[in-house]
Image: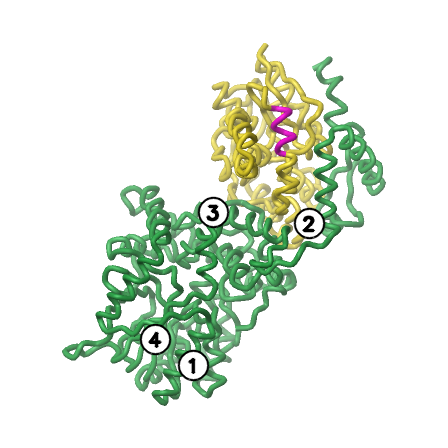
Chain colours: A green, B yellow
């Protein structure tokens, strides 16, 4: 997957003017948010159920090394082959070797952000192995060569006419139609054929249960279940934070995940796999490989300020409530993860220098924090990342801040900590600033305010500040 | 008369001093004696939000040394209160003595409507406005400090005022400090929706508790919908809002 996080501002501008994106963005996020709130009310005590999600995830993370080892033991005992991958390179290499060893011609995939993160599809294709995404939206996004627009609806913004043309061109749709049912059928026929002859299925993992060695996937289309039940070889890639202690906790998180993601009490398909097919079973893979991927996460785990982001279960709830995501959609975030969670994950996984806009483009409105099923304080984390960017922390991929900005804040703090200097500065700034004003308003000015003034006025600085009015005010009231 | 210390946000001091005057008048009307420390400047939020913690910490210490003797500090901005109440203790974590002083001050700093309703136990401040008012829930005040009902109670208690619903009242207006200057197009899309919702709701005036939101929303209304009014709650309650 191409990294385009540095094109945030221009992609956002383009998407603001894209009518197809607008149609979707005006409807779906708000709809999903309402559905989420309604679904949460089906808990006897919604606030307690919500809070419990954060408690479970926080506790699981604090026990992460122990739980991962427990998971490995129990999964291995059930016949799963567990592979620890330090980075994407190691994970991709393992999967490619496996495919080559078994002479695999193509693989089918369930939608997984983790394989987007490590760029698995590109590597397999470069090595002559066809890759078929089998989630309908992800399938369309793949055919179009576009990143996911929304974590749950990767191609929900694509107009039906475009899908018609795409399917006629690429998957042999014969009769032109814009009937969604017929288009769905065409994709189904195409993908059923792939499932029928499949040798290797690749999925992500929503949760891994330490006490049983089970991996859990939840979905609404049944394609992940196909990927898990009918191939000879199943490979499931999980980022290492997805482990939880017991089935009891996994089931509570599952309830929250479905409610927060799509407003459902439960997704249409939940599959739990503990090891590959037993000799007396008819379904399931002969080999089950679970890859536990680190890819920079141990470093996040070790930083007490950053560990919190590893609670994320990728429900997408934060996208749906984010007022910025609701305006610009998923493309500007430029990589595997979008919305508020992507504004933290992408910078941490890619480095701060190439994700500057993601860290800055936030009004700190806190809607994401309130919606998060695991209690992540996204604005708090963004403020931390901003401080690391300002400091130029090389461990997080930040180079030192440009000197005019650093100097500006030093000068600002120096003035504001010295009341006499502050008042002198205010008078100076006022005389300069008000040169651009007409009738008490500024409508055009050079400098940082210029862009604001394209769409809004700004007041001139009044002749007297509150400070200068105080004596009169106190006397006369 | 009991003293109450005015914490005037820099944005109010420099650009919207009428909000400070209105705050003064409302508190006077409630029988209090507002005092103003002339050494106050800026709480440091712009530096903090930009990630400049050392500079923000310096201004936090400046603020604390000015205000820490006050029994009650009142501010017509939720975000500035959030900064002092929640951010200062974290900012000064590495300096135990300062951390203690920040903690001691935190509970005595209040946003205006929170102070009137929760501390003074008043709803009716003698305000009057004949017409329909809608209320925009500013993010740092509502989700940040949990102050949502207090301003609405004050508006409802005003003589002649009908508080009308505002669609998506709790959605951000797109200000976000320098967000609005760095990402003006995204910010514009947000403030446009805020303005459209206000106009569609049919209220005569859009009331809000945050000077930053007011600059943004009023600036947009002036440009695109002249004659439509956005006011700060202090001015609304003082009954001296200036028509834009």
Instruction: Check the image and report above or below for B232 versus A156.
Output: above
Residue B64 sits inside the magenta stretch: yes
**Dot 2 alpha-carbon crowd within 10 angstroms: few under 14, some 14 to 19, many 20 or more:** some
Q: According to the image, label 3 marks what residue? A: A377
SS at mark 1?
A: strand
Instruction: Say whether residue A380 is left or right of residue A11.
Output: left
Q: Are marks 1 and 3 on the same chain?
A: yes
Q: Are marks 1 and 2 on the same chain?
A: no
Q: According to the image, label 2 marks what residue? A: B181
Taking depth in this image into account, of B136 and A8 the one nearest to the observer is A8
- Numbered range of the magenta stretch: B60-67
Q: Earlier in the sequence, mark 4 or mark 1?
A: 1
Q: Which of label 4 and label 1 is nearer to you?
A: 4
Q: Residue at x 23, y 62 (%)?
A: A212
Chain bearing mark 2: B
Residues at discs 4 and 2 in contact (Cβ within 8 Å)? no
Residues at discs 4 and 1 in contact (Cβ within 8 Å)? no
Q: Residue at x 46, y 49 (%)?
A: A304
Find the distance from the CA under tag 3 to the CA under tag 4. 33 Å
**Quarter of the image with the C terminus of chain B in it:** top right
Residue A7 sits inside the magenta stretch: no
- Residue A131 is labelled as 1
Would residue A48 be seen by someone viewing this image from the given angle? Answer: yes
Chain bearing mark 4: A
**Dot 3 alpha-carbon crowd within 10 angstroms: few under 14, some 14 to 19, many 20 or more:** some
Find the distance from the CA under tag 1 to the CA under tag 3. 37 Å
The secondary structure that dominates the magenta segment is helix
């Amino acid at each position: 997957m191409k990294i385009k996080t540095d094109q945030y501002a221009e992609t956002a501008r383009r998407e603001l003017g894209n009518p197809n994106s607008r149609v979707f963005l005006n409807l779906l996020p708000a709809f999903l948010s309402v559905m989420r709130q309604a679904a949460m009310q089906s808990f006897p005590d919604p606030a307690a159920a919500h809070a419990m999600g954060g408690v479970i995830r926080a506790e699981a993370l604090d026990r992460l090394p122990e739980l991962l080892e427990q998971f490995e033991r129990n999964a291995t005992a059930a016949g799963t082959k567990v592979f620890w991958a330090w980075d994407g390179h190691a994970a991709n290499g393992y999967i490619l070797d496996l495919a080559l060893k078994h002479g695999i011609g193509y693989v089918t995939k369930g939608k997984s952000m983790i394989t987007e993160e490590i760029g698995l599809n590109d590597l397999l294709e470069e090595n002559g192995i066809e890759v078929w995404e089998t989630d309908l939206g992800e399938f369309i996004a793949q055919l179009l060569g576009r990143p996911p627009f929304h974590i749950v609806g990767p191609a929900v913004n694509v107009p039906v006419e475009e899908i018609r043309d795409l399917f006629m061109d690429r998957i042999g749709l014969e009769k032109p139609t814009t009937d969604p049912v017929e288009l769905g059928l065409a994709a189904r026929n195409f993908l059923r054929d792939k499932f029928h002859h499949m040798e290797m299925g690749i999925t992500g993992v929503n949760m891994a249960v330490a006490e049983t060695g089970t991996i859990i996937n939840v979905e609404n289309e049944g394609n992940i279940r196909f990927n898990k039940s009918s191939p000879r070889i199943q490979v499931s890639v999980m980022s290492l934070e997805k482990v939880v202690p017991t089935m009891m906790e996994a089931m509570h998180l599952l309830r929250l995940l479905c409610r927060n993601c799509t407003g459902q009490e439960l997704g249409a398909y939940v599959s739990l796999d503990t090891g590959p097919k037993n000799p007396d079973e008819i379904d399931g893979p002969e080999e089950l490989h679970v890859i536990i991927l680190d890819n920079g996460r141990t470093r996040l785990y070790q930083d007490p300020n950053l560990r919190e982001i590893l609670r994320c279960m990728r429900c997408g709830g934060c996208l749906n409530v984010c007022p910025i995501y609701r305006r610009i959609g998923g493309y500007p975030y430029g990589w595997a993860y979008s919305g508020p969670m992507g504004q933290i994950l992408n910078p941490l996984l890619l480095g701060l220098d190439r994700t500057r806009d993601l860290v800055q483009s936030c009004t700190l409105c806190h809607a994401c924090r309130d919606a998060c099923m695991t209690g992540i304080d996204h604005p708090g984390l963004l403020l931390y990342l901003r401080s690391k960017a300002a400091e130029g922390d090389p461990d997080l991929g930040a180079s030192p801040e440009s000197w005019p900005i650093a100097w500006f804040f030093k000068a600002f703090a120096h003035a504001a900590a010295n009341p006499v200097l502050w008042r002198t500065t205010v008078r100076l700034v006022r005389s300069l600033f008000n040169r651009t004003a007409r009738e008490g308003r500024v409508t055009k000015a050079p400098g940082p305010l210029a862009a604001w003034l394209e769409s809004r006025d700004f007041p001139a600085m009044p002749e007297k500040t509150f400070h200068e009015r105080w004596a009169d005010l106190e006397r006369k009231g | 008369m009991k003293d109450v210390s005015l914490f005037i946000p820099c944005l109010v001091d420099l650009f919207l001093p009428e909000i400070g005057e209105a705050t003064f008048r409302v508190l006077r009307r409630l029988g209090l004696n507002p005092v103003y420390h002339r050494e106050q400047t800026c709480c440091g939020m712009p530096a903090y939000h930009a990630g400049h913690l050392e500079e923000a910490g310096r201004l936090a210490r400046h603020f604390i040394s000015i205000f820490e003797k006050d029994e009650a500090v009142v501010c017509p901005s939720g975000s500035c209160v959030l900064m002092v109440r929640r951010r200062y203790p974290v900012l000064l974590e590495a300096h135990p003595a300062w951390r203690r002083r920040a903690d001691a001050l935190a509970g005595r700093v209040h946003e205006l409507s929170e102070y009137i309703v929760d501390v003074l136990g008043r709803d009716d401040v003698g305000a009057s406005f004949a017409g329909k008012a809608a209320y925009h829930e500013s993010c740092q005040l509502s989700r940040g400090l949990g102050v949502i009902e207090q301003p609405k109670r004050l508006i409802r208690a005003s003589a002649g005022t009908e508080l009308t619903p505002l669609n998506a009242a709790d959605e951000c207006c797109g200000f976000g400090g320098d967000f609005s200057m760095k990402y003006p197009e995204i910010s514009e899309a947000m403030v446009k929706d805020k303005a459209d919702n206000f106009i569609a709701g049919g209220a005569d005036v859009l009331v809000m508790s945050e000077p930053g939101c007011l600059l943004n929303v009023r600036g947009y209304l002036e440009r695109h919908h002249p004659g439509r009014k956005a006011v700060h709650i202090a001015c609304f309650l003082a009954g001296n809002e200036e028509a834009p």
